Amino acid sequence: MTVDERVIIKKVVEEVVKRINGNGEEAYVPIGISNRHIHLSQKDLEILFGQGYKLTKMKDLKQPGQFAAKETVKIIGPKGFFEGVRILGPVRPETQVEISLSDGFKLGLSAPVRESGKTEDTPSFIIEGPKGSVEKKQGVIAALRHIHIPPTFADKFRLKDKELVNVEIDGIRKLVYHNVLIRVSDQFELEMHLDMDEANAGGISNGDLAKILKG
Amino acid sequence: MTVDERVIIKKVVEEVVKRINGNGEEAYVPIGISNRHIHLSQKDLEILFGQGYKLTKMKDLKQPGQFAAKETVKIIGPKGFFEGVRILGPVRPETQVEISLSDGFKLGLSAPVRESGKTEDTPSFIIEGPKGSVEKKQGVIAALRHIHIPPTFADKFRLKDKELVNVEIDGIRKLVYHNVLIRVSDQFELEMHLDMDEANAGGISNGDLAKILKG
């Protein structure tokens, strides 16, 4: 029997079990894949690009008000570096770089899996821009996988802000991600964020759908 | 109804009954993480390293008889290359390079997720060695995640060769991999193989334990 046939059998079994167990309506969420990127404070932006500097929008991101800037920087760790790391705007109160664990091996540092903004006791690193460089004492994270959810969708599927859910990805590399953080805000568009490692482990492309499994 | 269809139906019924009945003791398996590597035929080895060439063992791998060779090659795709790609020995009937999907992006090719040895209709690539180079018409795969299992362990946990199981990884990046291929042989040591993308998506280090979930 081929792998394809075995995959078909698994899908049939799952469908049978689902029908036996019964199900309500299912919550599907489009996936956005994040490559390594950096958020800068205005202070660091000015050190790197010059006094009074403002970011130039290259394109809007799906989350309202967020954008990919034209500007990039070089990120340097103890063992390696990445050039052309995209800056995401607008500026934030604190500088934070988000990388995959694979990126961490290349840089020679161990990025903890964290919620955005939780940068206490994370590794130090250096940022180089065209006008200067900054040595940050902390600020490297691997983003905790999460889903941006507007309140209407949250209400419909009884999802709560800060809840952790499981999320199923279908296909030959089918998997279920646990510990996926729900974030609810009327500022959000519906979107699940994964990094490159996570996307590739599931054979996922931008815009693929994830199914939320409650616990 | 064809024989194949009756076989599939029988397997589905068995699987449904198994899931309804539940399971006994839990099967844990140590994880081995595979970086990109290549298996060479003797013919290709000789083109790359010279007539009559034999691989030099650098270290034994966990699977009996398998070893990492001292020799490495350069792998070239349409958009990029990797130098220092480790050759795993002994030589095989067919040359095959195993990469992650991340590696595929760098090379500029799309590696299908396959069982080892199933290289029909996979991308072409170039191998460079110190004495020559080979253009392969096919042979790039992303390995289907799998578990090597000796017969005693398979019997104890009622695992069958070529069965697909689910595997749970614990931790902050807890997840469940589906479509994990079981391979049973008295030539095998107990070990689950994941690539770098898959390991990082689960926050997994070499030697971490995976729990087999039947269905």
Image: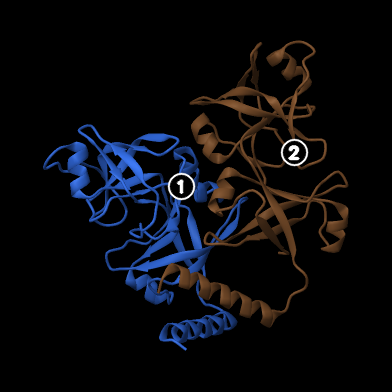
Chain colours: A brown, B blue
Residue drawn at 73 percent across, 19 percent down: A45
Q: Amino acid at mark 1?
A: Ser
Which of these two is toward me, B9 or A17? B9
Q: Nearer the viewer, mark 2 or mark 1?
A: 2
Q: Quadrant of residue A139?
A: top right
Q: Quadrant of the C terminus of chain A?
A: bottom right
Q: Label 1 crowding class (10 Å Cα cut-off): few <14, some 14-19, many 20+?
A: many
Residue A155: x percent and y percent?
87, 60
Q: Name the chain letter of the residue that bears numbered label 2.
A: A
Secondary structure under the numbered disc 1 in the rendered image: loop
Tell me, yes or no, whether the two marked residues, 2 and 1, touch with CB atoms within 8 Å. no
Task: Return the x and y of residue A62 as percentages of the image width and height.
Answer: 76, 42
Give the amino acid at mark 2. Answer: Leu
- Residue A93 visible? The answer is yes
- Residue B100, numbered circle: 1
| Marks 2 and 1 share the same chain | no
In the rendering, at what x and y percent does residue B214 appear? 52, 72
Q: What residue did someone put label 2 on?
A: A61
Measuring 66% from the left and 77% from the top, which residue is drawn there? A18
The answer to whether residue B55 is visible is no
Picture quadrant of residue A74: top right
Local secondary structure at mark 2: loop
Residue A72 locus on image (x, y percent): 64, 24
Q: Nearer the viewer, residue B36 or A214?
A: B36
Determine whether, in the image, residue B112 is placed left or right of residue B20.
left
